[in-house]
Image (cartoon, grey):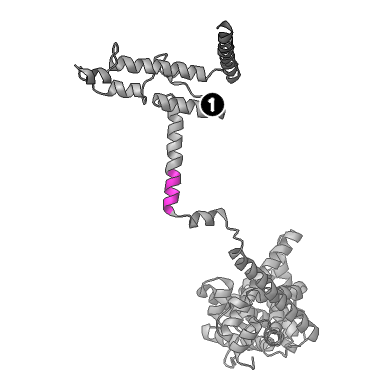
Amino acid sequence: MSERGDLSDDMTRADTTLLDDDTAERLLRGLPVDTAPSSVRALGDVLRALRDRTPAIDPAGERAGVAAFLAGLAQDEEVETAVVAPLAAPVVSLAARRQTRPRHLRFAAAAAVAGLTLLSGMAAVGALPGAAQTVAHDMLGTVGISVPEPASATDGHADTRGTDAGAGTNAPAPAPANGPAGAATTPVGSTATGGSGERQRRRNLGHCERRQEPGRRARAERGRRAGRHAESRWQPDRG
Amino acid sequence: VDQPFPQVIAAAQAGEHAAVAVLWKWLNPDLLLFLRARDPASAEDIASETWIRAGRSIRRFTGSEHDFRGWFFTIAWRALIDWQRKESRRRSTPADDSIFDELTADADTADTAIEHLQTDAALQLLQSLPPEQAEVILLRVIAGLDAERVARVMEKEIGNVRVLQHRGLRRLAVMLEHNAEADRVTP
């Protein structure tokens, strides 16, 4: 049988000894166990030898131990200083900053982002009203994002949504005016919708002109001015 | 501790050399003995690490003298575990049960413990126990902690600690009896 087997047998035998909870507690507390079997009494002597030994004090060890303790204390001071210092120059983590940010600001920021995303999406598919689509087209075009123009989004038809023309279209038709007042509000030879359509056409044309190359426009303008100036200079001579 | 404990702790928290020396004289012999029983080769190093850690967190300690012993040996226990983990990574040699067999078979060690009751021999006897059983007995006998504090130090249930200490004591008793019989057989 192996050593371990012998030990197991012995342990089974030890179960029958008087090592109950009370005896175990007395052994651990260094109290006498006179009524216990000899092996348990021997164990009591071993444990008492450990407990009652005379500690050897080593002065060099004491100096080293105290120095180690004070070094740890100094490290703790450094950590505490590092914790207090941010009051002057805060270095706060992103999570902490999120915690300290007021809730209503967070909601506002989230709403703004959501609104911007929605508008961008609508602009991308050309679903914005005409003027807004034009603005979106111009602004996003400057950052390299291509969104359709109002005309292309409406398949070649003028998009009058969100414009004066659109408002005119959606507004109830004005009652026919008889008299000067009516003549003043409604231009002769045009209806309300017709007038709005003309304005829109001019606006689109103006928009197209604005989209012309700036240098070309400037040159053309300079040419016209030069022509008028030359004309005005020539007139006195003619006279 | 001869002086009033709250004053000693307050002075140690303020970094007074004399107060720290009082604590060192009070606890270091037990600490070293505990560590020598668990890791004889590194006991001094782990003790030093324990004192550094104690200094690092002494300001946050509040409690009685007994609480301080439990607190201090909790630090020692964790320093020991950290050290052993570091060592096991360095060695990367798996523990072998045969070590235990060899230790229990070492009749000379137990004989010396019985005959001379010397501290070193007693420590070697304790080293032959499974680690957790040895640690519970060492914390109870050397550190002088009760079962409840040992449970807190080792982060175990108190019932588990009682089972470990009982098994360890029984095993030691059996070993001593075994060796006494061997002595009787071989005069």
The relative height of residue A113 versus residue B84 in the rendered view (above or below) is: above
**On the rendered image, what quadrant is the N terminus of chain B found in?**
bottom right
Pointer 1: what residue? A141
How many numbered marks are there?
A: 1
Query: Can residue A204 be seen by looking at this rendering?
Result: yes
Give x and y (percent) for residue B113.
73, 84
Q: Residue at x 66, y 89 (%)?
A: A48
Q: Which residue is drawn at 71% across and 67% down?
A: B83
Mark 1 neighbour class, 10 Å CA radius: few under 14, some 14 to 19, many 20 or more: few
Query: Can residue B111 be seen by looking at this rendering?
Result: no
In the picture provided, is B185 more to the left or to the right than A108? right
**Chain identifier of the residue bearing label 1 in the image:** A
The relative height of residue A235 versus residue B160 in the rendered view (above or below) is: above
Residue B100 in magenta stretch? no
Identify the residue at the far top of this view: A238
Where residue A227 sits, quadrant-wise, is top right
**On the rendered image, what quadrant is the C terminus of chain B found in?**
bottom right
Give x and y (percent) for residue A17.
56, 83
For the record, the magenta segment spans: A103-110
Give x and y (percent) for residue B64.
56, 85
